Amino acid sequence: MTDTTTDTETESEPKSESEGEQQPTSDRPHDQTRPILVASLEESIGKTAITLALAKHAAETGDSVGYMKPKGTRLQSNVGKTLDEDPMLARELLDLDAEMHDLEPVVYSPTFIEQAIRGRETTEELHDRVKEAFEALATNHDRLFLEGGGRLEQGGIVDLTDADVADLLDARVLLIAPYQTPGDIDDVLAAADTFGDRLDGVLFNAVSDSTRDQLEAEIAPFLEGRGVPVHGVLPREQTLAGVTVGDLADEIGGRVLVEEGLDAYVERFSVGAMGADSALRHFRRTKNAAVITGGDRADIHAAALEAPGVKCLILTGGHRPSGAILGQAAQKSVPVVLVQTDTLTTVERAEDVIRSGRTRDAQTVDQMGTLLGDHADLEALL
């Protein structure tokens, strides 16, 4: 809010019209509370849910909260326009009345990238567009939460990487990172070098029980010693990590031939395009996977059903498998889904569903909010 007392004290020195227009900029709430840019080391690590959960928590404490994703990277076609799904979800969950062109000033689509390479999108114009959208949003809110791209380096073609955005909008950065082995910390330290003093800290998400003790006891103190605050370690929740087989089947337009096990979760997919022996060795190394292969590949079907980590079979080309395969799948509670599309098309659809999941909704954000409250330092984050 503008300090009216200060305005009264300086009333004896009239301001020009242009100065009067600029005055709100210096007193905007975001100058008192710097925006938070939530960036991630890789895609599908919970960045959107964490960003919105933090925003909702800030709103519940009485702040007027805004959201912005400077460059849209998770794109879908919507009413004749290509838009990012995340700002649309943010507008709904945070009850925002901002226009989409402010919530998402740059649509980082393949077409946009081609135009930028050809010189039809200039860096200066894009930076001005992002800053104008930011200022339009910041005037109406106490806090602004910015969501980064899918990867730190995305946007480099037009100098709009997450680090560029943080510099452009004077934001502090919260880094979302996965953790499986100590070698993953190389990426965290590289990001810390990239962001420099703007890095506010790192939040580890979707950490398995088997690695959590080492992360908290050894890795976190090591990072703190290197000047990288660790704000929390969120445990892996399966309902946030993947989609059920039933949801996956619905999303790709599949016909369910074996219904046992439809509530199992799928987190990744594997393409059965090799020999049976190689396939069996490969499938045994995977976990919570959907195997996608031609409906006429009985050898691959049998190999997949021998692997405990395979949660469903997706058979392409409209080829119905033998009764023996269906019987074996039912006995082992492995659903079989039949699609008419070819394997490549099916892989692309399944990858998109599994990567983005159907969990980006109010329930997911609330669940992430609970995890943050239980396992993160919210006071430090906000």
Image (cartoon, helix red, strand yellow):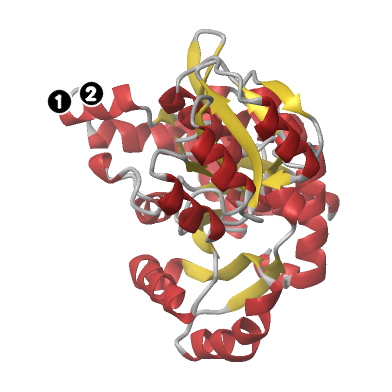
Quadrant of the rendered image containing residue 96: top right
Q: Residue shown at 65%/20% (left/top)?
A: 254
Q: Is residue 138 visible?
A: no
Q: Position of residue 315 (x, y in %)?
A: 56, 27
Q: Position of residue 65 (x, y in %)?
A: 71, 44
Extreme residue toward the top, this view: 80
Q: Tag 1: Cα neighbours inside 10 Å, few (<14), some, or many (≥20)?
A: few
Classify residue 163 as left or right of residue 85: left
- The residue to which callout 1 is attached is 118
Quadrant of the rendered image containing residue 157: top left
Q: Tag 2: Cα neighbours inside 10 Å, few (<14), some, or many (≥20)?
A: few
**Gap in angstroms between the C-alphas marked 2 and 1:** 5 Å
Image quadrant holding the C terminus, namely bottom right
**Mark 1 is on which residue type?**
Arg
Q: Position of residue 152 (x, y in %)?
A: 39, 54
Q: Are marks 2 and 1 in contact (CB under 8 Å)?
A: yes
Q: Dot 2: what SS?
A: helix
Q: Residue shown at 61%/56% (left/top)?
A: 287
Q: Which mark is residue 303?
A: none
Q: Is residue 256 visible?
A: yes
Q: Which mark is residue 115?
A: 2
**Mark 2 is on which residue type?**
Gln
Q: Residue shown at 54%/85% (left/top)?
A: 219
Classify residue 120 as left or right of residue 317: left
Q: Residue shown at 61%/25% (left/top)?
A: 321
Extreme residue toward the left, this view: 118
* Along the line of sight, the residue nearer the viewer: 124 or 149: 149
Q: Position of residue 141 (x, y in %)?
A: 67, 42
* Along the line of sight, the residue nearer the viewer: 203 or 173: 203
Q: Is residue 245 above or below residue 202?
A: above
Quadrant of the rendered image containing residue 31: bottom right
* Along the line of sight, the residue nearer the viewer: 379 or 11: 379
